[in-house]
C-alpha cells in the first residue's frame, strides 16, 4: 500500500524519461538509489488517492489533492474523520497515509484479523510493521 517504500502505489514519482526509452532518476528524491527495500523513483509518499496534481513551473512545488477515507465521524478507537487534503509538496517526504491525515492526526494501529485497536501511530516517525 501507500506505506510500502518498495511499492510505487500511493506515491508521486520523479523521473526523467529518456528519448531512447526507459528513464533515469534525478538526485534529490526521497530514497537514494541502493537504499534497501525502497524505490528511488519515489519523491513523495503517503497518499491515499492523489487524483489531481500540478507542478508550479517557477518553484517546482507540487500541489496534490488527496481524497481521504469516508469515515463520517471521529472514532477514538480507530481514528479521525474522513479528511480530504490539498498538499503543497515543497520537498521529498512522507505525507502520512495510512498512518496519519490532515494536520498530522493519527489513526490507531488496527488489527484487522482480531478486530482490535492498538495505540495511535506516531506521525513524526511512522513505522510500517505490516507483514
Image (cartoon, rainbow, N blue to C red):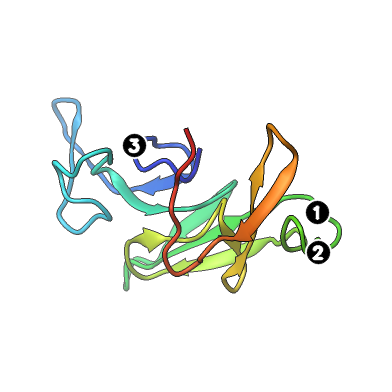
Which of the two discs, 3 and 2, labels the residue nearer the N terminus? 3
Q: Position of residue 19 (x, y in %)?
A: 16, 31
Real-space CA distance between mark 3 and mark 2, rounded to the nearest whole angstrom: 31 Å
Classed neighbour count for the residue bearing mark 3: other residues with Cα under 10 Å, few (<14), some (14–19), many (≥20): some
Q: Position of residue 17 (x, y in %)?
A: 22, 37
Residue at x-position 51% and y-position 59%:
96
Residue at x-position 65% and y-position 54%:
118
Classed neighbour count for the residue bearing mark 2: other residues with Cα under 10 Å, few (<14), some (14–19), many (≥20): few
Which of the two discs, 3 and 1, labels the residue nearer the N terminus? 3
Choose between 123 and 91: the one closer to the eye: 123
Real-space CA distance between mark 3 and mark 1, rounded to the nearest whole angstrom: 28 Å
Residue 71, label in figure: 1
Residue 41 location, quadrant: top left
In screen coordinates, is 78 left or right of 1? right
- Report the residue marked by disc 3: 6
Residue 74, label in figure: 2
Amino acid at each position: 500500500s501507500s506505506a510500502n517504500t518498495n511499492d510505487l502505489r500511493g506515491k508521486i514519482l520523479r523521473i526523467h524519461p529518456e528519448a531512447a526509452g526507459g528513464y533515469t532518476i534525478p538526485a534529490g528524491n526521497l530514497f537514494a538509489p541502493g537504499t534497501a527495500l525502497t524505490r528511488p523513483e519515489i519523491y513523495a509518499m503517503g497518499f491515499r488517492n492523489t487524483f489531481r496534481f500540478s507542478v508550479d513551473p517557477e518553484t517546482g512545488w507540487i500541489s496534490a489533492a488527496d481524497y481521504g477515507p469516508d469515515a463520517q465521524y471521529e472514532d477514538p478507537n480507530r481514528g479521525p474523520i474522513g479528511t480530504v487534503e490539498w498538499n503543497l509538496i515543497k520537498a521529498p517526504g512522507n505525507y502520512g497515509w495510512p498512518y496519519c491525515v490532515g494536520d498530522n492526526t493519527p489513526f490507531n494501529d488496527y488489527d484487522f484479523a482480531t478486530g482490535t485497536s492498538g495505540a495511535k501511530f506516531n506521525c513524526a516517525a511512522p513505522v510500517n510493521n505490516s507483514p
